[in-house]
Image (cartoon, rainbow, N blue to C red):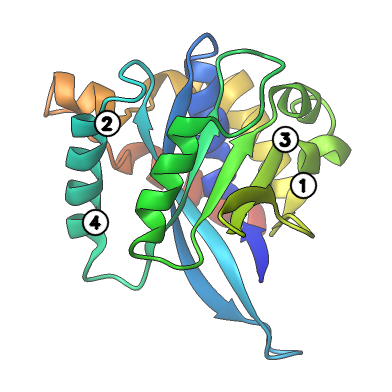
Amino acid sequence: MEVVVKTRAYVKICMHSLKYPHSTVCGLLLTTKRKKASTNQTYIEFLDAIPLIHSGHGLTHVLETALIQISNYYKSSDVQIGGIYQANKYFFDSQPNVFAQRLGEKVLENNSEAVVVMVNNIGLAQALDDQNEMDSALTVYHLSDQKWKAKSGGHRFENPSQAFNAVQEFIFKSQLHFQLIDFDNHLDDIRMDWNNKHINDVIDNWIKVSVD
């Protein structure tokens, strides 16, 4: 099934990765299913990214708390947790480690089409400067024969130029990524909003203006 990455999801993955460039970061992906009007084929759309951790990597209780709270928050909506993303702290390491695989399997328990999205640090570095390199920033894995394998066809961006320009705007110009809150931050201070409503609104308003 085709995977389509929307601008907000991509920008927040980049924000989380670049806010903590010397740490392994991971988060959840919110997805929904759509159908192409022209072919009636179903595809998965990555709507948003929910940053989870940057310091407590591998702490089971943190992840369980996050999964329960986030699942409950979105259970009455038409979106679901459809996968995870992870950026490894070592620049040349872009493979899903045991932690990413197990977290992906945890999401699979409630979503049979869940995927693991790995940030390719080398590809991301190139994608920040060149829109034509954006596809290499992310690698989508799915579970096949009990192993996480790179998905044939990978993914595509809903609007590549918009996603590229949004990263330039919110990371390099306004440096909004330093305001991003992950679940680690929330557990340190529960007043901090792991849903990042402020950032979501800023990105969405920018998208609306750019489309108009």
Nearer the observer, disc 3 or disc 1?
A: 3
Task: Tell me the CA gap for discs 2 and 3.
Answer: 24 Å
Provide residue 156's location: percent of width, then percent of height: 74, 56
Which amino acid, mark 2? Phe
- Asked whether the viewer can see residue 192, the reply is yes
- The secondary structure type at the circle numbered 1 is helix
Location of residue 108 by image quarter: bottom left
First in sequence, mark 3 or 1: give its number: 3
User: In the drawing, what numbered circle is on residue 137?
Assistant: 3
Task: Tell me the CA gap for discs 3 and 1.
Answer: 14 Å
Name the residue beneath numbered marker 2: 183
Task: Tell me the CA gap for discs 2 and 1.
Answer: 30 Å
Image point 26% across, 24% down: which residue? 184
Depth check, front residue: 210 or 161 = 161
User: In the drawing, what numbered circle is on residue 71?
Assistant: 4
Name the residue beneath numbered marker 1: 161
Task: Tell me the CA gap for discs 2 and 4.
Answer: 13 Å
Image point 49% across, 59% down: which residue? 114
37 w.r.t. 206: above or below: below
**Dot 3 alpha-carbon crowd within 10 angstroms: few under 14, some 14 to 19, many 20 or more:** many
Which amino acid, mark 3? Ala
